Amino acid sequence: MAVGIQAEGHPGGARRDGFHSDCPGRVLFRHVANRWGVLILTALRHGPLRFAALRDGVDGISEKMLSRNLRDLVRDGLVHREVEPTTPPGVTYSLTPLGEQLAARVHGLLTWVGDHTPDVLAARRRHDEARP
């Protein structure tokens, strides 16, 4: 299965396969597909949020992990960071058009997980009961 992407900075704009360790898309995949990236992108689908609202909405994420993930998503062009000229400065995060496209797809994954968790839990029980 080829998951080729144009690799910026590679000789001749060589296409890279996502299954190869040197594929630049792997870094993006890590930012998007880790457990926090998926939840942050989905939380922002409903509109801009301040840092504290994101932290409170993504249960279990530490401020450090939220900051790190937001920094990566902003750098990747998926999330926009706006600093408000208040005292103390308020920071609001929102999806960019690119981020909106991705968040719609990620939301589909979360919907599937929500719909099929009972099936997966039943499969786990059957598996565990069948083990000696």
Image (cartoon, rainbow, N blue to C red):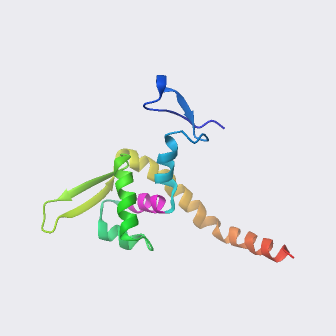
Q: Is residue 30 above or below residue 39?
A: above
For residue 130, what is the image quadrant? bottom right
Q: Is residue 43 magenta?
A: yes
| Residue 115 screen position, x and y as percent | 61, 65
Q: Is residue 39 magenta?
A: yes
**Nearer to us in this view, 8 or 98:** 8
What's the residue at 43%, 47% (across, down)?
101
What's the residue at 75%, 75% (across, down)?
125
For residue 81, what is the image quadrant? bottom left
| Residue 127 screen position, x and y as percent | 79, 71
Q: Main secondary structure of the magenta part?
A: helix
**Magenta region: which residues?**
36-45
What's the residue at 42%, 61% (across, down)?
40
Q: Residue furthest right?
A: 132
**Nearer to us in this view, 31 or 104:** 31
- In-image side of 84 versus 6 (left or right): left
What's the residue at 48%, 32% (across, down)?
7
Q: Is residue 109 above or below residue 101?
A: below
| Residue 4 screen position, x and y as percent | 56, 34
Quadrant including the C terminus: bottom right
- In-image side of 128 versus 72 (left or right): right
- In-image side of 1 versus 90 (left or right): right
Quadrant including the N terminus: top right
| Residue 128 screen position, x and y as percent | 78, 75
**Nearer to us in this view, 19 or 102:** 19
**Nearer to us in this view, 11 or 98:** 11
Number of marks drawn: 0
For residue 114, what is the image quadrant? bottom right
